[in-house]
Structures are given as C-alpha cells and as structure tokens.
Amino acid sequence: MSYQADLLDLDTLIAMKVSAPKVTQVPFDRAQASVEALVKFSAMNVPYEDFDGQRYWKAFLKELLIVAGFPENVISMHLGRAYRQMGLTSWRELEGYRVAWSETQLMILKKYFKVGQKQ
C-alpha cells in the first residue's frame, strides 16, 4: 500500500484558499442567470425523486440555454462551467451534457445569487 503525501498541509492549503484573489472563471451575472435558468426549468417540469425521497430535476445544458433565453454568445460550455463551480452534478450522454440539481440546492443557489428576490 502506498501513501502519497500532499504538498501542502491542510492549514496552509486553507490559508492559500482564503488569500486567493476573488476572481472566478464565470462572471457573477452569468452565474446568476444560470441559476435563473434552473428556476425556470424547475417551474416548468415535474421533479424526479431520488432513493432518499429528495426531489430533483435534470436537464441537458442545451435545454437550459433555450429556457433561459441566453444570448447566442453563451454556449453549453459556459453553462456547464458555472454549474460545476456551483457543485452541481453533471455527466455526458449521447445528446450532450446533463446537469442535475435538488430542490434544496436550488433554494441555496437562489438565496446566494439573490434570484427571485425583490431588489
């Protein structure tokens, strides 16, 4: 059995994360619009239920692009990157990438990105 030590200890790694510049690969407004797409899709579709009885939805990224009415310069790759950074589950199928999200995840994202709240 082999053991691979991490280059940095956990405290140092956390310090690095905390002191990292506050930039993302996905701009905040695009991430917010990505959450709005999840909200719209969820409102239009009946949820599935997982093994634990948790309600969830799944959609192809192409479907979310259409539902949200994103501009033509936003492509599936941009949307997929946003959802991965949000911690959502995604996978590849023949027709393209799918993403899945639970009702709880949607509530968390709506709150964080202030989607559906009066400004």
Image (cartoon, helix red, strand yellow):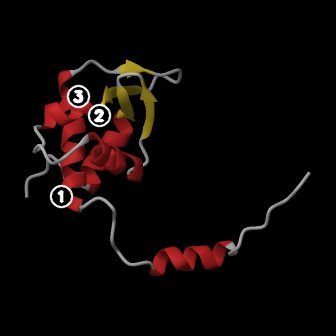
What residue appears at the point 15 percent right and 48 percent down from the top-left corner? 73
How far apart, in angstroms, are the residues tagged by discs 1 and 2? 18 Å
**Mark 3–mark 2 contact, CB under 8 Å?**
yes
Identify the residue under disc 1.
29
Residue 116: image location, x then y, percent: 14, 46
As drawn, the residue found furthest toward the right would be 1
- Say if 41 sits above or below 72 in the image: above
| Amino acid residing under circle 1 | Asp
What residue appears at the point 19 percent right and 36 percent down from the top-left corner? 65
Q: In the rendered image, which quarter contains the C terminus? A: bottom left
Residue 36: image location, x then y, percent: 18, 43
**Mark 1–mark 2 contact, CB under 8 Å?**
no
- Say if 34 sits above or below 91 in the image: below
How far apart, in angstroms, are the residues tagged by discs 1 and 3? 20 Å
Asked whether, in this view, residue 82 is left or right of residue 118, the answer is right
Location of residue 104 by image quarter: top left
Q: Earlier in the sequence, mark 1 or mark 2?
A: 1
Identify the residue under disc 3.
63
Location of residue 4 by image quarter: bottom right
Location of residue 68 by image quarter: top left
How far apart, in angstroms, are the residues tagged by discs 3 and 2? 5 Å
Q: Residues within 10 Å of mark 1 (few under 14, many from 20)?
A: few
Residue 18: image location, x then y, percent: 47, 77
What residue appears at the point 38 percent right and 78 percent down from the top-left corner? 21
| Amino acid residing under circle 3 | Glu
Asked whether, in this view, residue 12 is left or right of residue 57, the answer is right
Q: Nearer the viewer, mark 1 or mark 3?
A: 3
Asked whether, in this view, residue 5 is left or right of residue 49, the answer is right
